[in-house]
Image (cartoon, grey):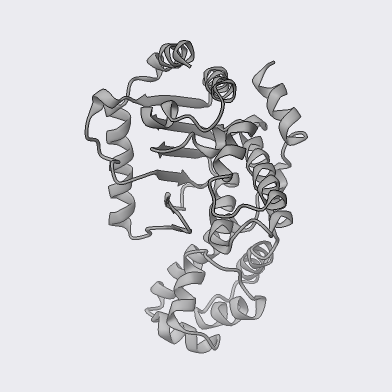
Amino acid sequence: MGVTRAVTERTGGPLDDRRSGPTVPRMILGARLRRLREARRITGAEAGEVIRASHSKISRLEMGRTGFKLRDVDDLLTLYGVDDAAERATLLALARQSNTPGWWHAYHDVVPSWLNVYLGLEQAAVVIRTYEQQFIPGLLQTEGYSRAVHRLTPEPQDGLLERRVELRMARQRILHRPGPPHLWAVIDEAALRRSMGSAAMMREQLEYLLEISRLAHITLQVLPFSAGGHAAVGGPVTVLRPPGAELPDVVYLEQLTGGVYPDKPAEIEQYRHVMNQVVIQAEPPTATADFLRRLLRET
């Protein structure tokens, strides 16, 4: 079965590109408001007073971590001296978009608040770079493997487990839509060798990786045990590049009960360096197919 056909059968058809969610509009609007505020030498605390909020609220708005009230945006634009009607209309339109729920809102019962931001970034990203130490990356998991991973959560409820699996399969549609992101994944050998269930299920997962790695927009590398210590030994790392040149890369560090988004420029640069080092330490992409075939023979 071909990759595209397999994904279509698992996820129910191509993803609607128009429903990539509110995250990127929030980031664009937040970045613009920050530049306007800094140009007028207005502090975050002063801006917060105008919209009856705290400095931390202004910080969250400028980082695109929360939605915007139209009244707040209108008040901030007045404070920042934005008199041009066209610019105000554009920024207020972004504020409206920032409150439009993404398609994954239908899975609100299994999507915690901290994951909402990541899903929006993932669905809109033009490049996704990721290193995984313990599991196959979520965007590359088969349904059986995903179900096995979700069974590891404490006291999984059958209904919610299936909903989580369904959501993960739906996320994968971005890889098979027109104009997909470039996914560059480095998988630790430990994740490939760790059995998550039956031998048949693991063979299916390895065969799927072998097949999907042939797609031009997917680069897959293996970090072998022989590499020894490496730059990402601390855990999984994902770096997402939003569309447009004005938005910075976003770093996502997944944890057991949440996710962290380091946002200082120095931190982002550090994690970009980590990903670059891991890519160098891993086997080249041209060696991936042979590595997976060897594992298949052993499984």
Q: Is residue 298 above or below residue 128?
A: above
Image coords of residue 18 (percent x, y) = 71, 47
Between residue 51 and residue 188, name the one nearer to us.
Answer: 188
Determine which quarter of the picture holds residue 208.
top right
Residue extending furthest right? 12
Image coords of residue 232 (percent x, y) = 30, 41
Residue 179 seen in render: no
Q: Is residue 170 above or below residue 258?
A: above
Between residue 188 and residue 89, name the one nearer to us.
Answer: 188
Q: Exactly how many numbered labels are in the figure?
A: 0
Residue extending furthest left? 229
Q: Residue at x 59, y 52 (%)?
A: 120
Determine which quarter of the picture holds residue 34.
bottom left
Q: Is residue 260 above or below residue 287?
A: below
Image coords of residue 207 (percent x, y) = 56, 18
Between residue 116 and residue 229, name the one nearer to us.
Answer: 229
Give the position of the N terminus as an image quadrant.
top right
Q: Residue at x 64, y 63 (%)?
A: 98
Left or right of residue 89, residue 136 in this image: left
Q: Residue at x 51, y 70 (%)?
A: 61
Q: Is residue 9 above or below residue 17?
A: above
Left or right of residue 57, residue 264 in this image: left
Between residue 239 and residue 206, name the one nearer to us.
Answer: 206
